[in-house]
Image: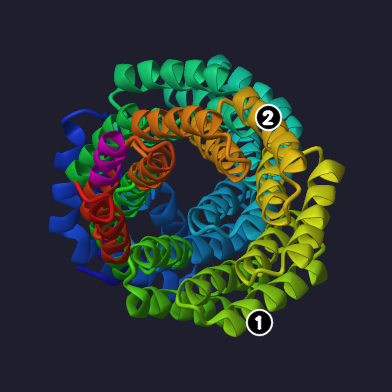
Amino acid sequence: MSHYAHAEYYLQVLNEVNQLYRQGGDYVNKAIRQLEEEWGQIERGQLWSASQAPHDDAAAQLCEDYADLGADILMLTKDVDKLMRWSTTALSAAQRLGLSTAESAHLGNLGIIHRNRGLFLQARMYFEQALNLARELGDIRLIGTWAGNLAGVLLEEGDVDQPIQLLNVALEFARQTGDKRLEATWLGNFGLAYSFGGKLEQAQIYYMDALEVQYLVGDKRAQGQTLGNIGNVYAEQEKYDEALKAYMLALDIAQELGDISSEGKWLGNIAGIYSAKGDYKTAVLHHSKALKLHRTIGDLAALRTELNNLGGALRVLGEYDHAEACYLELLQINESVNDKRGQIVALQGLGLLTRSTSRIHEAKMCFEYALRLAKDLQDVDQEGILLGYLGTLYYELADYTKSLELHNQALQIARTKNDLAALAMHLGNLANALNALGRVEDCIACAQQALTMHQTLHQQRMVGATMGILGNAYFSLRRYGDALRHYEDAMIIAVNVGDQLNAAHWNANLGYTLTALNQKQQAWQHFLRAEEFYGMLMLTDQVVTIREARQSLGL
């Protein structure tokens, strides 16, 4: 068999496998098995056609067809670098042959590949080129497809209004052409748009609509993505048990399909839920599994996310050496690709770590360097966050005046941005500094403002934390009854949202308050609960402190 005949034959094999995959349902696993059985010969045919494409029109057509006819299943099963090579050579072949429709398709597929790697700027450039070419051709299917994909990238970049307009176009064209798969995709992207805009109930309606269509057409991979997005909404609403169920369903689908990228993503999100519930030990196990998968497929964007999240969970558990290794690797990767925003994230992690280990000078250097990078990038959001971290650092150094100054600067940025969540956070930090300076009435005023904002945003975890700040203020004033009431509210909220760490903190503070009220038996019980929570979280230093407090009661 000649090289050309071999490549042509296995192109048809790839096309048949891809069509089988597109039927959805049980056909997906059958298609994946067939692809793996034939993969060696398919890859050999593609490599030959790509090598001959620059000077052989027939080979160039084959090269273009390989990336086109196998696009759906290859996006699921093959590594990113291989997809990049196939699509890049196919784009060159299409341009050489003057195949404008195919050129638009391959530009768009390159956009998808870059988006999946977290390279949103490059993805947007590819999608814009693909969309412009589709408009020149008047191809309504491609116009809708690339308008919808462009909307998704713009959402990732923080734009909400323009994506809604693009998605209306995409959804209309999908319905005109009767493409149910694309209709479900754009319904899901509407969900993303409303989720990013803070309209979570509306987002959930679109996700449910998308999921219904995906079940109808048997698109399992899309079902997994939508279930994950539903989990994201539940997580944002602090409905952690519901979020966990949705993520587990998404994980099951990813594992069934052999979709390593999605498996890693959902493992990471499951880990995030365990962290939110205060179960950092289980979170570390899931983050570690996700990290291993991302290394396997070379997904740099996901790898960086998991290094940061794993470092955070390890830091809370007191496994400082392992946490530091994560942050240092993250910093090295981000420096190697000249990603200054990524460097800021790594430096924040190192700053928090070195602060936890009393390496205060190093922590200060990390936060200040990150702040300079944020100012260079004119990233005022990160600037506000870093000012807040520095304010907290100076608070721990007992320089409350400097802490107050920095928190006020962070607060001003949040006011300029009209960022209610950031305003609430910085008001809470400001309240702590004011309390330490003896300006307790001002502390209470700030904390009450923060509390109202968190309640407006339905941030139950932060409502509980702010209740705790008010409890601290009333304790400072020796208004133990008011302190008791606020600590009890804070503790109940922490338990309800599954926040074991704060449940431990507020039980401990209830113990101290009840001790001040000479209610030793009740104080003993709260100290015991705090000790149990700290023990479950393996926070041994806190266990020792609380045990000593309990024993001092003499009961």
What residue do we see at 44% from left, 49% from top?
Answer: 68
Give the residues drawn in magenta, as a range. Answer: 520-529
Q: In which quarter of the image is residue 225?
A: top left
Q: Say if 309 sits above or below 135 in the image.
A: below
Numbered circle sitting on residue 365? 1
* Residue 183 visible in this rendered orientation of the protein: yes
Residue 523 included in the magenta stretch of the image: yes
Q: Residues within 10 Å of mark 1 (few under 14, many from 20)?
A: some
Q: Quick check: 247 left or right of 442?
A: left
What residue do we see at 38% from left, 42% from top?
Answer: 515
Residue wearing tag 2: 453
For the residues marked 1 and 2, what is the alpha-carbon distance in whole angstroms? 32 Å
Numbered circle sitting on residue 37? none
Q: Residues within 10 Å of mark 2 (few under 14, many from 20)?
A: many
> Which secondary structure dominates the residues rendered in magenta?
helix
Amino acid type indicated by mark 2: Met
**What quarter of the picture does the N terminus occupy?**
bottom left
Residue 239 image offset from top left, x and y in percent? 39, 28
